[in-house]
Image: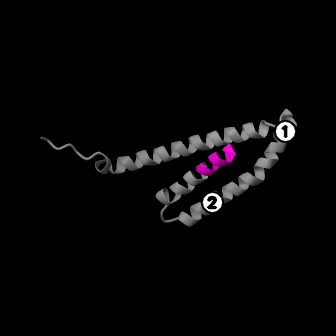
Amino acid sequence: MLIGIVWGIGKAAVYKYIPDFFPEQVGVVGGMVGVLGGLGGFFCPIIFGYLLNSTGLWTSCWIFMCLLSVACLVWLHRVVTKKIRREARLFPEEIYPPKRPI
């Protein structure tokens, strides 16, 4: 239940940033995100089987999903932070208005 909630929040965060960063290509980028999700649904069960065979642990797939989720969270955070900093350099007067002498 908890992992479903966390993944739902993560998916909403990804789809929230699509129109912010790609306003002219919302459909294309949204489709690409959906395709990547579909590929994850195809390849992850195969990886789960290999993990079970190699480790013998049923929980190895949950550990893999936890590590993959953390990696995706860190990647999303770095990309969004980098994009925001780049935009802040382009328009610094809008974020930090110049100080006026008193």
Q: Position of residue 8 (x, y in %)?
A: 62, 51
The residue shown at (59%, 49%) is 9
Amino acid on which disc 2 is placed? Met
Q: Quadrant of residue 102?
A: top left
The residue to which callout 1 is attached is 52
Residue 61 lies left or right of residue 84; in this view the side is right
Residue 50 lies left or right of residue 70; in this view the side is right
Of all residues, the one furthest to the front in this rendering is 1
In front here: 12 or 69? Answer: 12
| Mark number displayed over residue 32 | 2
| Mark number displayed over residue 63 | none
Dominant SS type (magenta): helix
Classify 10 Å Cα crowding around label 1: few (below 14), some (14-19), many (20 and above): some
Amino acid on which disc 1 is placed? Leu
**Which type of secondary structure does the marked residue at label 2 adopt?**
helix
Scheme of image coloration: one colour
Tags 1 and 2 touching, CB below 8 Å: no
In front here: 92 or 4? Answer: 4
The residue shown at (14%, 41%) is 101
The residue shown at (73%, 36%) is 63
Q: CA distance from mark 1 to mark 2?
A: 30 Å
Which stretch appears magenta?
1-9
Q: Position of residue 40 (x, y in %)?
A: 72, 52
Q: Position of residue 95 (x, y in %)?
A: 32, 48
Asked if residue 95 lies in the magenta stretch, the reply is no
Residue 34 lies left or right of residue 90; in this view the side is right
Q: How many marks?
A: 2
Of all residues, the one furthest to the left in this rendering is 102
Residue 13 lies left or right of residue 90; in this view the side is right
**Which type of secondary structure does the marked residue at label 1 adopt?**
helix
